[in-house]
Image (cartoon, rainbow, N blue to C red):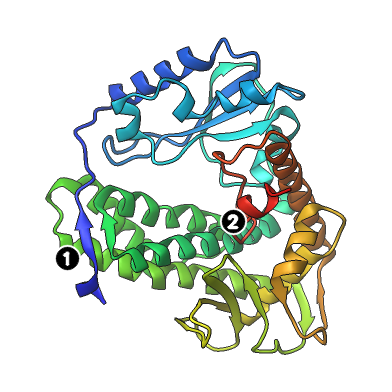
Amino acid sequence: MSNKLSVINDLHEIEEEDYNRVINDYIDAVSSNPAVSAIYKMGNISDPGISDLDLIVVAKECSNSINIHKLSINNSGRSELFNKIFLHDVYLCDTSVIRKIRYTSLCDNLSLLFGDDQNIMDVDGKELGPLSLQIIFDFVSSRLVQFKQYLSAGSIGIRGTLVRVSSIRHSYNLLKNLGVNDKETESFISQVTEMRKNARTVKDDDIIDLFLRSFNMFERIVQLAADCFFDKYLNFFTAVDPSNSLKLNNLFNLKFLAIPLGDGANTNGSVSIFYPEATFYHYMEYTKGNHPIANITSNYLSFTGGERYDISEEYKSTLEKRLWLISKQLTFLKKNRVNFAMCGYPGFIINQECLQD
């Protein structure tokens, strides 16, 4: 498999002050925009030249759509330095979502850069366990789809690989909220950290090896999370029909199996990403309720209809809160015809579908 992959050197000589300059340039470009309520930075610049830059822009409710579109980094005087530092556009939400943003996405080390403090809430203690599992299931599925797309393209970047593979530490930190400690995962994270520090001397074969091993490690995270889900929140369930699947996009399906994880091709040519059997019932909960997520998931989740299960009220109520917030975010993006901003991790490629009329 590694013979089919080529490595692109996407590294640039970038210092920490370059990140600060890009942040200041972006703020200068949008600070006079009447739609802006606040700008936050998420995470730290631990490895200049490797680290991504994650900005959260909070728009005032009822803002003009034209002004909202001007908040994209592509519409704010993007410079060559912008191209070198940003791996994606800003995360955009309005003031009704930002206070509970930790229920929708992985949000660590938030710092206010501009505007009014939005009084972002911490997660309620009793909801931390269920929410940690929900974000893991949803984030990892979207990450595995992304990795399989890179595999199909036949090339990976050094920086892009190191940034995206190292995101496993966020999922592992969520697992630790449930008391899980795993030496194999910790060893892998240490290896990624060391490679980030020495990115300019790392060999192409080592990058390829890291990328390929990351599939197994993300799958391991999901298996550990599924074990917690089964032990703590899934009271009982019937065996999952092997024909059940969740359509992630036009090429990828999420399949639910009682056997160890792996990957393979379906007879129709699409690629399956396998999740532990119990996680099927996590996604079954997506089909319930009156929020847009329920309607979308109902269209893309194929199931026999004979499955029976019982999930704890604690898990269901936390997921309901999370899905309502993601639905509000999607409604905001659709209303303003925004297709450049992220929307959380609802477990499948949802942006395009929700933005269609």
Taking depth in this image into account, of 223 and 307 the one nearest to the observer is: 307
Q: Which of 206 and 182 is in front in this view?
A: 206
| Residue 100 can be seen, yes or no | yes
> Where residue 79 sits: x, y (%)?
33, 24
| Residue highlighted by disc 2 | 177
Q: Residues within 10 Å of mark 2 (few under 14, many from 20)?
A: some
- Relative horizontal placement of residue 32, taking residue 14 as reference (left or right): right
**Which of labels 1 and 2 is toward the front?**
1
C-alpha separation, residue under disc 1 versus residue under disc 2: 34 Å
Three-letter amino acid code of the residue under disc 1: Asp
Please tell me in which quadrant of the rendered image residue 245 appears: bottom right
Residue occupied by mark 1: 205
Q: As drawn, which residue projects farthest toward the front?
A: 357
330 up-or-down from 260: above or below:
above
Give the residue at x 63% y 61%.
133
Give SS at disc 1. Answer: helix
Q: Mark yes or no: residue 183 visible.
A: no
* Residue ID at (69%, 49%): 356
The amino acid type, in three-letter code, at marker 2 is Asn
- Residue 38 drawn at (x, y percent): 61, 21
Spot occupied by residue 243 in the image (x, y as percentages of width and height): 66, 87
> Is 61 on the left-hand or right-hand side of 163?
right
Q: Which residue is at 73% across, 36% downward?
A: 335
Q: In this view, does 216 lie above or below 34?
A: below
